[in-house]
Amino acid sequence: TQLLEQSPQFLSIQEGENLTVYCNSSSVFSSLQWYRQEPGEGPVLLVTVVTGGEVKKLKRLTFQFGDARKDSSLHITAAQPGDTGLYLCAGAENDYKLSFGAGTTVTVRA
Amino acid sequence: NAGVTQTPKFQVLKTGQSMTLQCAQDMNHNSMYWYRQDPGMGLRLIYYSASEGTTDKGEVPNGYNVSRLNKREFSLRLESAAPSQTSVYFCASSDRVAQHFGDGTRLSIL
């Protein structure tokens, strides 16, 4: 049983459309991270959110941490084919350990 | 900019064979990790080393052993490989802000 549930599992959209990926848990985390993974490579950190209610923007990507620090969302505006990849959320249990969600596979069609 | 280097990149074993996966990081990080990634299950922690000289079990440690050889190197050993250990294995190191991943070892057990 995974601590973090991601939805949807798969998402396929046309270039220019918007998308949102959700990450939910019944546990409280000290921080939450989002990673993106491309085929044949390891995950790469996109952002870390620490404070409940925090919103961070990274160009066309907007990350939100829930007020109770149990859930998070990733919103991509005007998606591009280069946004294609596996998006993983990870909650920090302590200073050392992360619990990962199963991931959302995003495909942006040109 | 090597970051985290994993060897080998691919390996095929027969059931019962043993193997050691190697990992080295050049970022002077204290913490290192071994994960396995299976379809639909995200990343699951096998073992981690919070600092040189210490190792701890993660979520799925059975069938594996680890050695933190020095601050740079953290190896994962399969003593008697089983088909259920067919997976992609990722090593990571951490500066307590983000985990930095290698590109993985794709391991098939026949």
Image (tube, rainbow, N blue to C red):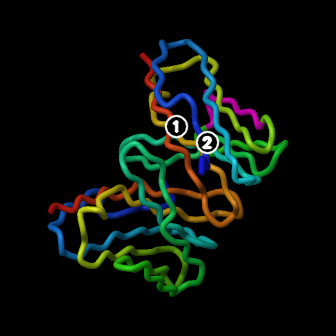
Left or right placement of residue A94 versus residue A107 in this view: right
Residue A30, image x and y in percent? 63, 73
Relative vertical location of residue B39 with respect to residue A89 in this rendering, above or below: above
Whether residues under marks 2 and 1 lie with C-beta atoms below 8 angstroms apart, the answer is: yes
Residue B97 at x, y = what percent? 65, 66
Query: B86 above or below A37?
Result: above
Give the residues in magenta. B61-68
Which label was assigned to residue B34?
2
Dot 1: chain letter: B
The disc labelled 1 sits on which kind of residue?
Tyr
Q: Earlier in the sequence, mark 2 or mark 1?
A: 2
Q: Residue at left 34%, top 58%?
A: A104
Furthest residue in direction right, as rendered = B53
How many numbered tags mark residues here? 2
A4 or A43, nearer to the observer: A43
The residue under label 2 is which amino acid type? Trp
